[in-house]
Amino acid sequence: MSKFSAYNFKDIKALVRVDFNVPLNDQFEITDDTRMTATLPTLKKILSDGGSVILMSHLGRPKEGSIDKYSLRHLVNHLQSLLGNTKVDFANDCIGQEAIDKSSNLQSGEVLLLENLRFYKEEEKGDRIFAEKLSKLGDVYVNDAFGTAHRAHASTSIIADYFSPDKKMFGLLMEAEVISAEKVLHAAEKPFTAIIGGAKVSDKILIIENLLNRATDIIIGGGMAYTFWKAQGKQIGNSLCEDDRLHLALEILAKAKQLGVNIHLPMDSTIADKFAADAQTTNCESYGIPSGWMGLDIGKKAIADFREVILKSKTILWNGPMGVFEMEKFQEGTKSIALAVAEATANGAFSLVGGGDSVAAVNKFHLADKVSYVSTGGGAMLEYFEGKELPGIAAVKKG
C-alpha cells in the first residue's frame, strides 16, 4: 500500500501542492478542468479521513505581482462543485496573516485555497524563506502536482525540506504518474514502441536518445520526420525542416541501426500547397515532395505501417501528434494512431500517453479511457523520459 493511502489524515491539516494551472476564457470560466478533476481522489481521501486541506497552486505566468486575470479565486466555485459542494474558503494571499489565520482556523472536512504562488517571484526562484513560510500552514506536505515536478520551485521541492520524512508524501495522482512512467522506462514489456511526433527534432532529441537504449521500435511522425528524410538526401518540398539538425538525425539513425532499434519514418504524407485549413491537398511519398508543397500529416501507407507496429507492441509510449490535427484535413494520421493505440491496449498492451498535444488528441477523439494512462504533466513527463531526475519527486523521496 502507498504511503499516502496508508496515512490517516484525521485532524491533520494537509498542505497539498496541486497543479490547477487550467485554461480560462475571457469570462474567467474554466475551459478544461482535467487537472482539477485528476487530483480529486487525493483531496477526497484526506477529507473523508477527517482531515482538512490547504491547497496551493500557480496559474499562468504573471509577470509583476498580483493580477486579477491570474487569481485562483476564479476557480473557487468550480472546485466547490467538484468536491460535492464542500465549502472552499479562499485566502487573498498565499503567505501573510490572512493565510495563517484561515489555515489555523480550518476545521476537519474543510478546504482552503491559497492565492497564486507565482504572485511572488520567490516561488520560481526556489526561495527558502518563502518555502518555510508556506510550510508553516500545514501539518503534512502532499505533492500531487506532477505537471510541475520538473521545476525546483519553492512549493514543489524546497518546501519538502521543512517536513520530516513521515510528514511528506506524494498524492494519488503523483503516485500514479510516477508508477506509470517508471513502468514504461524501467520495466517495459517488449516489444516496446515509442511514438514520437511534433514539429521539431530539437524538442525531442533527448527523449529519442534515451529511448534508443530501451525501445524496440521508434515511430517518428509530425513535422520532425521531414528533417530525417532531408538528412538522407530526399526531397521534402516546403515541409518543416531543421537544417541545423540534419547531421544529428543521421547520427540517431546510425545509432538505432547499431543498437538494433527499428526507426519507422512515414513513407507517405498528406501534402498541402499552403499551411491553411482550406489548402489544396494530395497524397505523395514523404521522400519526394515537390517544391511549393509541404507535408502536414502522415499518409495512408504510413498509417497502415505504423498501425501494424503498434498492434504488435506490449508497451507503448506516445508523445506528440502525427500532423496538424487541429485542422480537419490533417487529423487523420493522429486520429488513426490514437485508435491503433486504443486497440493495442484493448488487446493487453500497456499504453502511456503524455505531452499536451497527444493528450489533447486522445481527448478530442474520446479515447482517453481506452488507453492505460494519460499523463497530466507535459514538460515533466518529457524530462522524465529524457532520463532527468525531477526535483519535485526527488525532494519527497529524500529522507
Image: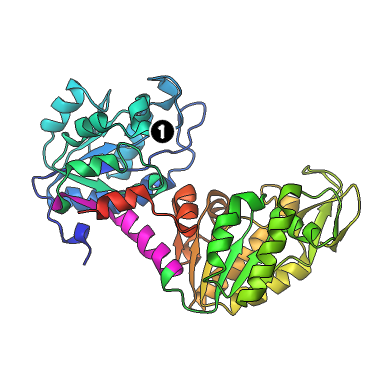
Colour theme: rainbow
From where the camera sits, is residue 85 visible?
no
Provide the secondary structure element on which disc 1 rests.
loop
Q: Tell me: 153 left or right of 328.
A: left
Q: Nearer the viewer, residue 325 or 125?
A: 125
Residue 33 position in % (x across, y down): 43, 43
Q: Residue at x 58, y 50 (%)?
A: 357
Q: Residue at x 24, y 47 (%)?
A: 142
Circle 1 residues within 10 Å: few <14, some 14–19, many ≥20: many
Magenta stretch bounds: 166-185
Residue 367 position in % (x across, y down): 53, 61
Residue 115 position in % (x across, y down): 31, 28
Q: Main secondary structure of the magenta part?
A: helix
Instruction: Based on the picture, tell me whether residue 168 belongs to the magenta stretch.
Output: yes
Q: Residue at x 38, y 20 (%)?
A: 65
Q: Residue at x 21, y 22 (%)?
A: 96
Judge whether 375 appears above or below 352 on screen.
Answer: above
Q: Which residue is mark 1?
A: 59
Image quarter of residue 112: top left
Q: Which amino acid type is marked by label 1? A: Leu
Instruction: Based on the picture, tell me whether residue 196 belongs to the magenta stretch.
Output: no
Q: Tell me: 371 left or right of 325.
A: left
Q: Tell me: 214 left or right of 266.
A: left
Residue 199 position in % (x across, y down): 67, 50
From where the camera sits, is residue 12 visible?
yes
Q: Nearer the viewer, residue 24 or 253?
A: 253
Judge whether 102 appears above or below 229 on screen.
Answer: above
Image quarter of residue 86: top left
Q: Nearer the viewer, residue 41 or 217?
A: 217
